[in-house]
Image (tube, rainbow, N blue to C red):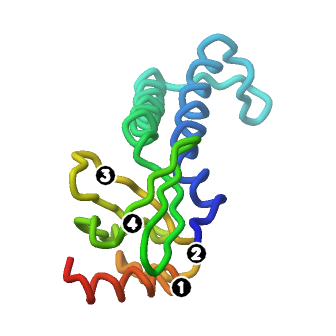
Amino acid sequence: MESSKETYYGFKYLPLIIGALLISFPVLNYFNPESATVNGEAVKLDPWLSLIILLCGCLAILAFLYFKDSYVMVEIGKQAIRIKDGKEELLVNWIGVESVNLIYFIFPPLYKLRIKGYDDYFLFTTGRSGFHIAGFTKDFSEAGDLINKKKRELGF
């Protein structure tokens, strides 16, 4: 069972795309105020609104820079987890896993994986099979079932 490529790339690069778009709106409006029109008249954004939009874009790009190395694709098996980070692969036995936790309030289901002997953590998705209601996220994928089974067996 392997991570979904669509959700992997979505989680990894969506903050960068949103941040670039948010930064581009006030910059374009500053240099070309006639580009935005309402009822045929040019509209210039309020400087405070431009600053807020610009800061939100910067925060989104900072979030991308902070989390970009944590997102990985995983292949989950009954005996081991294969972590794929670009060209590098890491094979970890389930006994070497410190914790696997579902991050609530995020859909599609996003997991946080910690491995014994590593200071850092990994973030991965299992796919789009699940539901999200009022902050409660449930994963119905085969990988999610296997993760829950291994958590019960190994007690982490």
Q: Residues within 10 Å of mark 2 (few under 14, many from 20)?
A: some
Which residue, given by chain and number where applicable, does mark 3 sit on?
Answer: 121
Q: Is there a contact, CB below 8 Å, between mark 3 and mark 1?
A: no
Mark 2 or 1: in front is 2
Across and down, in percent, residue 88 comes to: 52, 43
Q: Counting residues from the N terminus, which is met first, the one under dot 2 or under dot 1?
A: 2
CA gap, disc 3 and disc 2: 20 Å
Mark 4 or 2: in front is 2
Q: Tell me the kind of residue under disc 4.
A: Tyr
Give the numbered dot on residue 142.
Answer: 1
Horizontal placement of 138 versus 84: left or right?
left
**Secondary structure at numbered mark 2:** loop
Q: Is there a contact, CB below 8 Å, between mark 4 and mark 3?
A: no
Q: Can you say whether 146 is above or below 71 in the image? A: below
CA gap, disc 1 and disc 4: 14 Å
Name the foreground residue: 36 vs 131: 131
Q: How many marks?
A: 4
Horizontal placement of 153 versus 11: left or right?
left
Q: Is there a contact, CB below 8 Å, between mark 3 and mark 2?
A: no
Horizontal placement of 3 versus 67: left or right?
right
Name the residue: 76% across, 36% down: 39
Name the residue: 54% across, 37% down: 16
Which quarter of the figure is the N terminus placed in?
bottom right
Q: Can you say whether 114 is above or below 142 in the image? A: above
**Secondary structure at numbered mark 1:** helix
Which residue, given by chain and number where applicable, does mark 2 sit on?
Answer: 1
Q: Tell me the kind of residue under disc 1.
A: Glu
Q: Counting residues from the N terminus, which is met first, the one under dot 3 or under dot 2?
A: 2
Across and down, in percent, residue 57 comes to: 48, 33
Which residue, given by chain and number where applicable, does mark 4 sit on?
Answer: 111
Q: Which image quarter: residue 133?
A: bottom left
